[in-house]
Image (cartoon, helix red, strand yellow):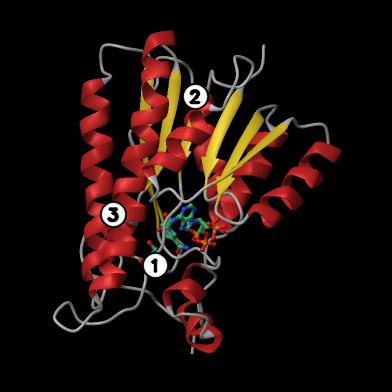
Amino acid sequence: MKKIALITGATSGIGEACARKFAEGGYDLILTARREEKLAEIKAELEARGTEVKTLAFDVRDTAAAKKAIDSLDEEWNKINVLINNAGLALGLDKEYEAKPEEWDAMIDTNVKGLLTMTRLVVPGMVERNDGNVINIGSVAGDAAYAGGNVYCATKAAVKALSDGLRIDVADTAVRVTNLKPGLVETNFSKVRFHGDNERADNVYKGIKPLTGADIADVAFYAASAPKHVQIAEVLILATHQASGSVVHREK
Ligand code: NDP
Ligand code: 8X3
């Protein structure tokens, strides 16, 4: 029988690494993100290696588009075993009283409401089948605010609350909920945060060996493969020289 993982934000970074890891682990994949062309490239690459891949291009902030995409899945594809709620972003590092309200909207609508939308669309089927894993990509940023992190940190604190809340709501089923909280992972995250300023983005990872998307994918895969009586509820995963959201030891 098919094992299916649906990954949001699968065109880059952690989501793309999860696609590769779950493909290697024998899953068929539903890959979602906004960039259709990039989704098609990853699909072609993984299909050449024997994984069945379906792509659904939509913006997780568009609830109607997300619903239409999930409703389009037929019997063969709609029994999703693993939902990886990964699509997300940070924008800017401005002080809370100076930041741009439109950037708050983008972060809250993607990181919080987008994750909720996908949960609302996919989890009822898991509950009905009494099987499933929801892996939410939270962050060390959700544990404590750091300078300029304000709204982004708040969205990741919300991911913790929503993961904890969902875990309570499915406690009478075999559905498992994981809040996976990475620290510094070198992806396109900082390029997006700093609006394409690559020099500023590179400085985020200067003097430290950061995590890779593959490091996070390994933990996500373990959470989905743990024995059925084991629920990996929350994992904080940091680079060795990072101690918290605001303490990083950098080589000069
Ligand atoms: P990337 O920028 O490399 O990837 C982000 C992914 O999210 C892309 O595939 C992008 O695809 C997708 N995405 C963004 N906005 C939307 C949207 N509105 N609708 C659908 N898809 C969207 O960053 P990361 O891989 O680093 O980030 C993945 C997750 O990990 C995020 O939730 C982030 O907050 C979290 N995280 C990242 C850390 C890091 O240090 N990198 C640490 C801790 C957590 P597309 O543009 O094609 O839509
Ligand atoms: C991303 C990690 O520390 O840059 O969530 O906010 S951090």
Q: Position of residue 2 (x, y in %)?
A: 66, 17
The correct choice, above or below, for 48 with respect to 228 in the image is below
Apparent side of residue 83 relative to residue 161 in the rendered image (left or right): right
Q: Mark 1 and mark 3 in contact (Cβ < 8 Å)?
A: no
| Quarter the N terminus occupies | top right
Residue indicated by mark 3 = 156
Residue indicated by mark 1 = 242
Which quadrant contains ligand 2?
A: bottom left
The mark closer to the camera, 3 or 1, is 3
Q: Mark 1 and mark 2 in contact (Cβ < 8 Å)?
A: no
The correct choice, above or below, for 171 with respect to 133 in the image is above
The structure residue drawn at horizontal position 20% and vertical position 82%, both measured from the top left corner, is 95
Instruction: Inspect the image, locate mark 1, and give the three-letter code of the amino acid beneath it.
Output: Gln
As drawn, the label of residue 226 is 2
The structure residue drawn at horizontal position 36% and vertical position 46%, both measured from the top left corner, is 114
Label 1 CB-ligand 2 distance < 8 A: no
Earlier residue among tags 2 and 3? 3
Q: Mark 3 and mark 2 in contact (Cβ < 8 Å)?
A: no
Instruction: Inspect the image, locate mark 3, and give the three-letter code of the amino acid beneath it.
Output: Lys
Label 2 CB-ligand 1 distance < 8 A: no
Apparent side of residue 41 relative to residue 177 in the rendered image (left or right): right
